[in-house]
Image (cartoon, rainbow, N blue to C red):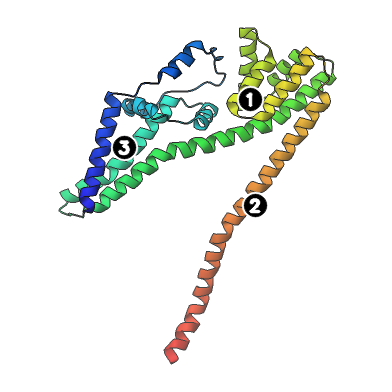
Amino acid sequence: MISALLWGAGLGVGLWALVVYVFPPKPPLRTLVDRLHSTPAPPPILAADSDGWALRVGKPFIKPLAALGLPNRKLRNDLAVTGKGIEHHLAEKATFALTGLLLPILMQLLLVVTDVSPEWEVPAIASLILALGGFLLPDISVRREAERRRSTFRHALSAYLNLIRVLLAGGAGVDGALSDAVGIGKGWAFQQIRRALVTAKLTRTTPWSTLGQLGTELDVHQLSELAASVSLAGTEGARVRASLAAKAAALRTRELTDAEGDAQSATERMSLPVVVLFGGFLVFIGFPALAQVLGGL
């Protein structure tokens, strides 16, 4: 009964994937009309890389997975932060899932060649579990990498705010302070800010608008707040040095709090191995005496 259910489920999933690949679902008419009348969005500031062996292997599965609505909006933002293309991510998910699905089957074939005939239920269940794990593994790695990059960007943004505040105090203009401050810093975060300011010059838009767009793409609201504050200084002539200093102090406090929280969580994770090691040490010390007592009874 179990084998029949597994074969039926596998056949149904395979036929469904084949139908979706041959006849992909079409978007509704409402969506097409909204696309015609919508205002075109500005080009993204974050660059995406779409290359690699996984893209070439899993390319036939990109359209079926995209037709299912993958990835979701939050994961798209994480992909933009990590610089990975959507097609690359979907192809990677399909490649890892196929690898996990076929690996136990290949192992079973090797055992059959060596005159060992194990039960097929165990490789089938292992294939399903590994395929599911391989399908979810790229999402987990992208979320972790995106969160790490956001933390790095917030740390660099606090230094950038201090540099802007110093340049404004020295009599520089708003545009000059933004450009000069980003020219001093190095690293991925300053490279993205520099790209946003260059985009503003090429498209003849205000630098605070592109910085706000970059903050939205990165999902870093502190950068959006910086853009709003600088826009007040650029359009209304407001003094923002005190506001920038307060934002920089708030960012440093948050980074310090996050670092302390990570250190405490690492300490808690280390408590379990220490307890297990201590228990093993007690067993090692007390076993000879316990064996002696039990042998004397």
Counting from the top left corner in percent of width and height, residue 230 is at 75, 19
Q: How many marks?
A: 3
For disc 3, the marked residue is 98
Look at 35% across and 33% down and name the residue there.
94
Under mark 2, the amino acid is Gln
Look at 80% across and 24% down and name the residue there.
165
The image quarter containing residue 238 is top right
For disc 1, the marked residue is 215
Q: Residues within 10 Å of mark 3 (few under 14, many from 20)?
A: some
Does dot 1 land on a helix, a strand or a loop?
A: helix
In the picture, the quarter occupied by the C terminus is bottom left
Disc ID at residue 186: none
Look at 48% across and 83% down and name the residue there.
290
132 vs 156, nearest the viewer: 132
Q: Is residue 187 among the parts visible in the rendering? A: no
- The answer to which of marks 2 and 1 sits earlier in the sequence is 1
Q: Residues within 10 Å of mark 2 (few under 14, many from 20)?
A: few
Instruction: Say if mark 2 contacts mark 1, CB within 8 Å.
Output: no
